Image (cartoon, helix red, strand yellow):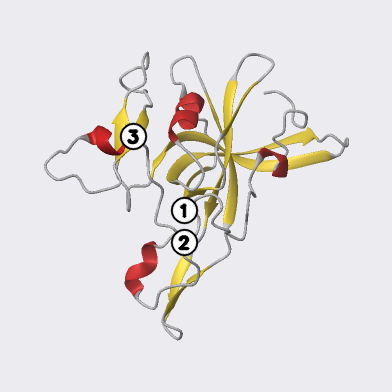
Amino acid sequence: MAAGDTVITVVGNLTADPEIRTTANGGTVANFTIASTPRQYNRNTQQWEDGDALFMRCSAWDSNYNPMASNIQASLAKGMRVIAQGRLVQRSYQDREGNNRTVVELRVDEIGPGLTRNTAQVSKSAGTSNDGGRGGFAGNSGNSNGGGNANANAGYRGGAGYQGGASAAPAQQGVDPWSASEGSGNSYGSFGSSDDFGGGSGDEPEF
């Protein structure tokens, strides 16, 4: 990490499945968008209220030692709550219509599932080093009592589904508007795909 890098951590939910593509020079990159929505309790209405969502476009690359993009594709899906840390980068490209565009995105260095309302079992990827390996994970949607069979509930489970509106009790702070499964009718639909940020195969230059 270079001096002067702007390092941030984003916690939120994936708006769509990660998109994997291979560049002309053989690199593998995963592109995805994290929606981070602040929530605060309104004591006047006694309800939790959503603030304006931040849509952070992200990219993660495979390297010779750490297949992070491939691990993300194997581990993450739409609606999952994640924690991502990386560096903000700005880049320019020309879209299909010949217009010059500039975007700011998060170049991800580390990413994993949010465990406030979920569990996950990490498995090391083959061929990765001990100090830098990034493994996939299989979730366990229930609590583990005495080390139960982790394979019984394979697959990471996203946060609690959003039912619309907010609970009157502060204990409902954990309700997550972005963890709804596909087809649940959330207001943002499929926003966050590569086409929304110039990530289509014909838009942006190869890195």
| Quarter in which the C terminus is drawn | top right
Identity, as a three-letter code, of the amino acid under mark 3: Ala
Q: Which of the two residues, 71 or 134, is positioned nearer the viewer here?
A: 71
Q: Tell me the residue that label 2 is attached to.
A: 162
Say if 82 sits above or below 178 in the image: above
Q: Quadrant of residue 171?
A: bottom left
User: Can you give x and y, in whole percent of width and height, for residue 204 in the image?
Assistant: 74, 31
Say if 120 sits above or below 116 in the image: above
Identity, as a three-letter code, of the amino acid under mark 2: Tyr
Q: Which mark, residue 144?
A: none
Q: Of the residues under marks 2 and 1, which one precedes in the sequence? A: 2
Q: Of the residues under marks 3 and 1, which one precedes in the sequence? A: 3
> Few, some or many C-alpha atoms within 10 Å of disc 2 (few <14, some 14-19, many ≥20)?
some
User: Can you give x and y, in whole percent of width and height, for residue 150 in the image?
Assistant: 23, 35
User: What residue lies at 52% left-to-right and 30% top-to-bottom?
Assistant: 2
Q: Which mark, residue 179?
A: 1
Say if 193 sits above or below 36 in the image: above
Identity, as a three-letter code, of the amino acid under mark 1: Ser
In the picture, measured across the screen, residue 125 lies left or right of residue 96, that is left
In the picture, measured across the screen, residue 168 lies left or right of residue 18, that is left
User: Can you give x and y, in whole percent of width and height, for residue 146 in the image?
Assistant: 11, 42
> Between marks 3 and 2, how big is the CA–CA gap?
23 Å
Q: Which of the two residues, 131 or 194, is positioned nearer the viewer here?
A: 194
Q: Are marks 2 and 1 in contact (CB under 8 Å)?
A: yes
Q: Tell me the residue that label 3 is attached to.
A: 138
> Few, some or many C-alpha atoms within 10 Å of disc 3 (few <14, some 14-19, many ≥20)?
some
> Between marks 2 and 1, how big is the CA–CA gap?
7 Å
In the picture, measured across the screen, residue 33 lies left or right of residue 139, that is right
In the picture, measured across the screen, residue 126 lies left or right of residue 63, that is left
Single out the residue that lies furthest toward the left. 146
User: What residue lies at 55% left-to-right and 39% top-to-bottom?
Assistant: 17
Q: Of the residues under marks 3 and 2, which one precedes in the sequence? A: 3
